[in-house]
Each structure stands twice: as C-alpha cells, then as structure tokens.
Image (tube, rainbow, N blue to C red):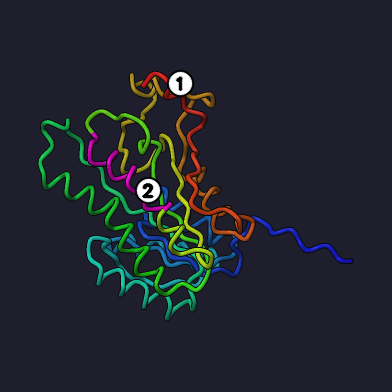
Amino acid sequence: MTEPATPTVSVAEKNAVVIGGTSGIGRAIALAFADDGADVVATSRHEDAVESTAEELRERGAETATVTCDVRDEESIEHLYDVAADALGEIDVLVNSAGSVAKAPVTEMEEPDWARDIDTNLTGVFRACQVFGREMDSGSIITISSMSAGQAREQRPAYCAAKSGVNGLTRAAAADLGPEVRVNAIEPGFVETPLAGDAFEEGTELREQIDERTPLERVAQPDEIAGAAVYLASDAASFTTGEMIKVDGGYDDSSL
C-alpha cells in the first residue's frame, strides 16, 4: 500500500492577496510567497508602493496586478477581490496586514485617532474576511495580529484593543468559514518596520530592555515573520485553524 504524500510547507502554484503588502511585514510575506512559486497581488492605499511592489513580484516570476485598497472602505475591498480574481483566478490565500498605530495615553487619545486604529486594524480585517470569505471555496486567511493583543503597552490603547479583537475575530471566522477555509493569526513581537520607525534603534533604552527580555537578544526583521505565513498558507497547515502563532523571539512578558 502506497503511503500518502506528506504535505510540504510550500505555497507554489497558489494565488494570494496580501493587503498591506507593500511595506513591512506584509511586503516580506508577499515577496516570500512569490519566491516560493505563488502568484501574488500585494496592495495598500499607496499607488506608487503598489506599482513598485508589483514590479518586484514580477521579477520573482509571479503573476500579479496593480490595484490599491483601503480597508476602511468595503467597496475598495470588493474591487480588490474582483481585480485579483480576474488576474489570478480563484484566490487561495488572503493575508490581512494593513495597520496603523496612534500613540497617546488612554486619557489623552483623541477619539478620531482611536476610531482610525480600530477601523484599520480590526474592522478592516472584518471587512476583508467578509468579502473574501464569501468567495473563497477553500484555502487560508491569515491575519497579522501582535503580541500586544495579550500584553500591556503604554500609549497604545487603540492598537492593543484592536489586536485583541483581531484574535477573537480570527477564532470566530475560523468557526464560521470552516471546514473549507482556515483562518489563523500571526502575533509578531518587536519587528523593524517603517511603521515602527526608529523606536527599536540599537543603543536606545527601549532596545536594551527588549534585548534583555528576549532570549534571541534582538528584534526581528520582517522576513522572519514571513515563514509563519508560508506555513499557514501551505497544505502542511491543513489541520491548523483558529490559532494564534506567536513569533517574538521568546520575549518574556512575565513582569507586565
């Protein structure tokens, strides 16, 4: 009797859409997918970034399309799906990586800043899961959460609240969309991205504190988060859904 083949950690020949895929973690995921043989549409609100990322994807051999998307607008997400499906065919993978961070203590945060973070980081994920979930017959949806979903972070009340909500939404969407579509989240730790700016620069007090509490003694690069996305999008993760995978270098939050 021939044993069934073991599923491999690969996204080759899959069709993927990465929202927030033109910078930081999202861009690293989009490029990793392309390097592994997937066709990828990477999108964001910024036309120049969409075009330059699409060119990088083509250089890696991926089929793609150039289309902007604002997760705060459901019609924009619907348009994204139509363009991506027309260019690639049936969508196998959706990655939700769009994000924003408003910084202020809870007593001082302006309500418009709170609303923008919640709308982008949480409600935008809901909209994308809803639009794509209605159309996907199988495959994987991956949300980019944060270790801040379960930890205290000074001056980031909206971001922490939104990421906590993303984890709950991930579990609920996994229950609603299964068994056909799997839904999981990645919880990155401290990552050097344009959104983080120079916050994690070496030599700063914050960076020293992070290194001291991280067994790997450093912060991550975006492509170190991409590996988890490749796994979750692959057939090797066929029995993984409703899960949060933390990629934080072992960061110790026990004193928080």
Mark 1 element type:
helix
On screen, 77 above or below 192? below
Quadrant where the C terminus sits is top left
Marking on residue 45: none
Characterize the magenta stretch by its predominant secondary structure. Answer: helix
Quadrant of residue 161 in the image?
top left
Instruction: Tell whether 215 sits left or right of 68.
Output: right
Residue 42 point in image, percent of width and height: 40, 63
The boundaries of the magenta stretch are 156-171
N-term-proximal mark, 2 vs 1? 2
| The magenta stretch spans residue 208 | no
Mark 2 surroundings within 10 Å by alpha-carbon count, few (fewer than 14), some (14 through 19), many (20 or more): some
Three-letter code for the amino acid on which mark 1 is drawn: Arg
| The magenta stretch spans residue 167 | yes
Quadrant of residue 213 in the image?
top left
Residue 28 point in image, percent of width and height: 46, 51
Residue 173 point in image, percent of width and height: 41, 58
Mark 1 surroundings within 10 Å by alpha-carbon count, few (fewer than 14), some (14 through 19), many (20 or more): some
Question: What residue does disc 1 label?
Answer: 213
Q: Residue at x 36, y 36 (%)?
A: 148
Is 195 or 7 nearer to us in this picture?
7
Three-letter code for the amino acid on which mark 2 is drawn: Gly
Is 71 or 200 nearer to us in this picture?
71
Residue 113 point in image, percent of width and height: 15, 45
On screen, 256 above or below 139? above
Is 56 or 142 nearer to us in this picture?
142
Instruction: Tell whether 253 sits left or right of 127.
Output: right
Question: What residue does disc 2 label?
Answer: 168
**Between tags 2 and 1, which lies in front?**
2
